[in-house]
Amino acid sequence: MRVLHVSSGNLYGGIEALLHTVAREQHHHPALSHAFALCFEGRLARELRDAGAELHLLGPTRAGRPWSVWRARSVLRELLRGGRHDAVICHAIWPQALFGPVARVAGVPLVFFQHDALSGRHWLERWARVTPPDLVLSNSRFSAGTLASVYPRVPFRVSHCPLPTPSPMPAAPTRARLRESLGAAEDDVVILSASRMQEWKGQRLLLEALGRLRGTPGWRAWIAGGAQRPEEAAYLEGLRAQVAQLGLEGRVGFLGQRGDVPWLLRAADLHCQPNVGPEPFGLAFVEALQAGLPVVTTAMGGALEIVDDTCGVLVPPEPEPLAQALKRLIEEPQTRSWLGSAGPARAAALSDAGDFFRRLEDAVRTLSGQEARA
């Protein structure tokens, strides 16, 4: 059985991490063959090639440039000709709106992988509503709860994003060298925040909380994630100014876009991404749990399906309770260790790759059977 995953490819976040994981892990699950179609060259395209995946480029596509949409649809139409694919999976609303109609006309079962909460009001969502998929895979129960605003009658399944096979734990000197290179001493408690550089991810709130911990010794904070759009660059500059205003220079480091987040997680002591808007799922939380880090985040969205008091701390989206939660974990190594020890099992229960591939295979077989009966 053969699946074609369709995505944009111009940015990098949770969707791209999922697709990279599928490419790397698919040889462990040979019942499905996975190919990928992207509109743009970029980090994801490079990672898919490095993983040996079958990659097709549809060409740069902008919804505001109809000729580019027509051209990309023509490339996809040729890919689907001849019935080589058992399903097309459009990852997020943009490719669903632009390319769902191509799969529908080609007679290939269409799956919409829902990575975001929906409102039904955005113009892309209204466009995508014209072409209902055969099935929706929602990345969380929270996301699935918003699906009816666009597809009220389409069946859905909750499918958490998978985690790759854990990397081997680095030797202590390697961990120490990485920490030292990023300004952390051996006995510092390192707080890592690794996410897209967007305000709703909570970096500003994190800095406000850290500003209240200036007098607390023995901590450093690493903020990983690079600006990918002009508005993100402006936001990042605002964060740098906030660090200076709070007197946190030397204690907060901006690491930029990183390709070694698994190693950063294993060099850190706790993970904090205090969203001020609900996270649809929160793959970064699961990655942190897999690495054995306690997670501190805000009590909203998909995080409520991931983090509980066995593996982390949930707080209101306010600086004072966040500061108190961080202070406790900074000062209580036994609490950090206890919460961190529960993380790997929790991550495996939520996002086991084998479970993800088995569920996906079952979904595709069901759809293919429906197509055959039709």
Image: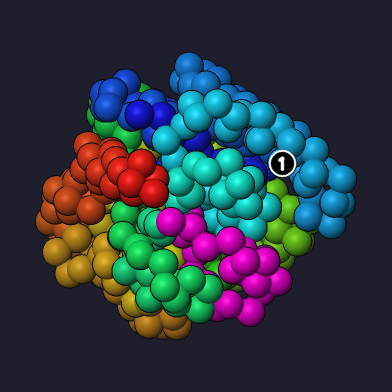
Residue segment shown in magenta: 112-134
Neighbour tally class for label 1: few under 14, some 14-19, many 20 plus, Cα within 10 Å: many
Residue 122 included in the magenta stretch of the image: yes
Q: Residue at x 56, y 49 (%)?
A: 104
- Whether residue 179 appears in magenta in the rendering, the answer is no
The structure residue drawn at horizontal position 74% and vertical position 53%, both measured from the top left corner, is 229
Q: Quadrant of residue 32?
A: top left
Q: Is residue 86 visible?
A: yes
Q: Is residue 90 left or right of residue 25?
A: right
How many numbered tags mark residues here?
A: 1
Please state if 214 lies on the left or on the right of 309 as rendered.
right
351 versus 335 height, above or below: above
Task: Give amino acid for label 1.
Answer: Arg
In x, y percent, where is residue 284?
40, 52
| Secondary structure at numbered mark 1 | helix
Residue at horizontal 69 percent and vertical 38 percent from the top: 39
The residue identified by callout 1 is 73
Image quarter hosting the N terminus: top left
Specify whether residue 292 is in view. Answer: no
Q: Is residue 134 above or below residue 103?
A: below
**Which residue occupies 80% across, 44% down?**
70
